[in-house]
Image (cartoon, grey):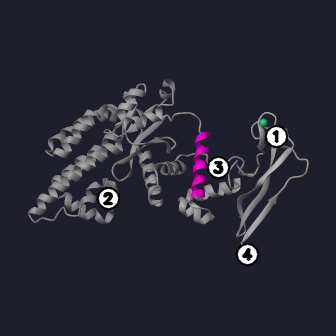
Amino acid sequence: MKDQRVDVFVEHKAGEEFTCPECGRKLGVYDHAEERTWRHLDSCQFTTMLRARIPRVQCPEHGVRQAGVPWAEPRSRFTLLFERFAIDVLLETDVAGAAKILGISWDEAHHIMRRAVTRGRARKPRKLARRIGVDEKAIAKRHKYMTIVSDIDRGTVEFLAEGRTKDSLFSYLAPYTVAEVAQIEAVAMDMWSPYFETASKWIPLAADKIVFDRYHVVQHMNHAVDQVRRAESKALWQEGDATLRGTRHLWLYAEENLPEHRAEHFASLRGLRLKTGRAWAIKEMLRDLWNCPSRPAAEAFHARWHAWATRARMPAVFKVAKMVKSHLHNILTYYAHRITNAVSEGLNSAIQTIKKRAGGYRNVENFKTAIYFHCGGLDLYPAHSTR
Ligand SMILES: [Zn+2]
């Protein structure tokens, strides 16, 4: 009562046989190891510990070995049921929060997470995803990046590599044979990514498989709109005109996402025939490049858009128009594959949450573990733990 604890002492019958953990041979007891404890699920509010001296067997082939116990994985300090519960808690919160709820240390909670990821990744069949997204993610200040390869159809993180170089993507493909890599049907990425070269070099028929995805293309255009607004706003402000002050976010919304309470203000701004308004309209038109009935229709649509964008006399917009034109083939491969990197963008925000929740990571390895744990779509639970 004083320690709020239940101790369960586990023993075995005399003459019982146990199996060698290596070969499964049935053997008599050789001796017993020192008593060990395993944390089990609480009994009511009481911390519950399993205590046992594990029998050892002497295998003619493998020597003296500890018999396996049915309630825990080798070397674990927790029972399978506790570990399973801990995984469920970890899935709902971060390591520090889970440690607090479970009454274990941060290191123990993290260790359970790491073991779960190792288990899940070992169970994963050796197979490349058919349609992948490749994206970069800033993981720390000072330009530290991570490469994220995602399975577009499953919405899971398949692979993480440090950095955002050609090698980062190559390290995903490297363990596979040419025939296996050839199974990749499509790859979504940004136009300006270093991954293009790697994908082109190593994925057979890459020219028709790489899709510069909509999200990133429109991002570049959004950035151009912002540059136009900034310059115009500054020029107006110098003449004492505050029209564009504080309007940054209004121009970045997709038209249909504009909040209702800002709609009137935005409509009045658009009525002013500002450069920014024109840049915004060019951006909105570009978004329809992905809504054409077919690739030839999209090509014709692009020609009209390009003519408008390049005659608009806005260097930032002109630059994007040039970039879109030179990358057009792999933008319009969209019509063959119908993929975007939206999945990796979703994962990106999930990863952002993981990063924020943990208040930063002590090292990249721990961060990667947490990403695989939450976003890897892995089978994390220890075997037999449902019993
Ligand atoms: Zn053996």
State which quadrant residue 85 falls in.
bottom right
Residue 377 in percent (x, y) is at: 55, 46
Mark 2 vs mark 3: in front: 3
Residue 54 in percent (x, y) is at: 79, 51
Q: Residues within 10 Å of mark 3 (few under 14, many from 20)?
A: many
Instruction: Provide the residue designation for mark 3.
Output: 381
Instruction: Provide the residue designation for mark 4.
Output: 2
Residue 273 showing in the rendered view: no
Span of residues in magenta? 107-122
Q: Is residue 355 left or right of residue 6?
A: left
> Secondary structure under badge 3?
loop
Q: Amino acid at mark 3?
A: Tyr
Considering depth in this image, is 308 or 128 the residue closer to the camera?
128
Q: Is residue 384 left or right of residue 254?
A: right
Residue 188 in percent (x, y) is at: 40, 38
Label 2 CB-ligand 1 distance < 8 A: no
Q: Amino acid at mark 2?
A: Leu
Residue sitting at the far bottom: 2
Q: Amino acid at mark 4?
A: Lys
Q: CA distance from mark 1 to mark 3?
A: 31 Å
Task: Tell me which numbered mark, 4 or 1, is placed earlier along the sequence.
Answer: 4
Please tell me which residue is depicted at 62% across the width and 63% down the height of the picture.
Answer: 102
Mark 3 vs mark 4: in front: 4
Are discs 2 and 3 less than 8 Å apart at CB? no
Task: Tell me which numbered mark, 1 or 3, is placed earlier along the sequence.
Answer: 1
Ligand 1 lies in quarter: top right
> Secondary structure under badge 4?
loop
Check residue 258 in the rendering and tell me which mark sits there, or answer none. 2
